[in-house]
Amino acid sequence: MISLQNVSKTYKDGDQIVHAVDGVSLEVGAGDFVSVVGHSGSGKTTLLSLMGGLTKPQSGSVTIGGTEIWNLPDNDLSAFRNKNVNFIFQFASLVPTLTCLENVLLPTAFGKSGDGLAEYARSLLEMVGLKDKINSYPSRLSGGQQRRVAIARAFINSPRVVLADEPTGDLDEATESEIMEIFRKKCAEGTTFIIVTHNSSLAAEAKSRYRMSAGRLERAS
Ligand code: ADP
Ligand code: MG
């Protein structure tokens, strides 16, 4: 489903070079549940962003569903990404002037819109426990509720892959286990998950477990 071959990404910090991701190779199969743990600054967010085609590596190749993504023209890449991959970012990143329902529907603006979509968006908001907030604006929601909207939004295009960066980071335990239940359900339905997390029980549950350390990826046991 996703294949990284010897992928590296460096950043310049003054006259220093930071090897954020350093020669990482990884195969993620369709329907896999992958967890990545590691200290702050070890390269986890950069790795996710490389896996989803948001960041271009300096070297190495990134293949999603058999397509070498950096060989696609720019326009095709955004369409491809929009169709195949979805991100749950560390912070909810909702559009404040749109309602919850409109936020969930936002990624579909690129794709085809259909009558069923609004209905589906409602069912996703219901799934994350926000049935009564469908027409509310993000500023009226708590941080945890905003996070749930972002999670609902991640599923609107029925992505084959969900890349989640500490998706349950600031949630209470009860909400966290509800969100995990949703991920399990979607995974059982065939969605591929790559999750960066600080939560060791969440990480332990994954079929494939990795640890990032100074830009290197290693198997975690
Ligand atoms: P993590 O998610 O594990 O905390 P990141 O992938 O965010 O790690 O960062 C890895 C390293 O790359 C860190 O040293 C960070 O400071 C650096 N880095 C990340 N993004 C940038 C950027 N846009 N510009 C410069 N340095 C960056
Ligand atoms: Mg990070």
Image (cartoon, rainbow, N blue to C red):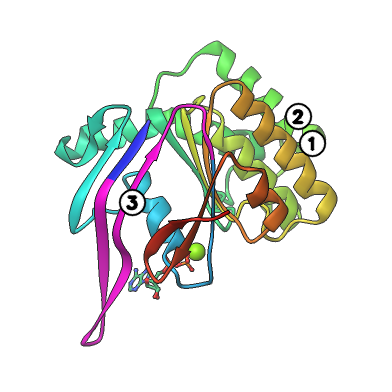
* Left or right of 184, for residue 92: left
Report the residue marked by disc 3: 50
User: For the magenta stretch, what is the residue range?
Assistant: 5-33
* Contact check, label 1 and label 2, Cβ < 8 Å: yes
Name the residue: 45% across, 59% down.
45
Name the residue: 26% across, 54% down.
7
Rate crowding at label 3 as few (under 14), some (14 to 19) or many (20 or more) other CA atoms within 10 Å: many
Q: Which mark is residue 76?
A: none
Name the residue: 57% across, 36% down.
153
Instruction: Relative to 11, say whether 206 is above or below.
Output: above
Instruction: Give the Cα distance between marks 3 and 1.
Output: 31 Å
* Left or right of 32, for residue 71: left
Looking at marks 3 and 2 on the same chain, the residue that comes earlier in the sequence is marked by 3
Q: Position of residue 32 (x, y in %)?
A: 51, 33
Q: Amino acid at mark 3?
A: Leu
Q: Considering depth in this image, is 5 or 45 the residue closer to the camera?
A: 5
Q: Which mark is residue 129?
A: 1
The image quarter containing residue 220 is bottom right
Residue placed furthest toward the top: 115
Q: Considering depth in this image, is 10 or 129 the residue closer to the camera?
A: 10
Query: In the image, which is nearer the foreground, mark 3 or mark 2?
Result: 3
Mostly what secondary structure, the magenta segment?
A: strand
Q: Amino acid at mark 2?
A: Glu
Q: Position of residue 211 (x, y in %)?
A: 50, 59
Instruction: Give the Cα distance between marks 3 and 2.
Output: 31 Å
Q: Please say whether residue 159 is one of the residues in the magenta stretch.
A: no
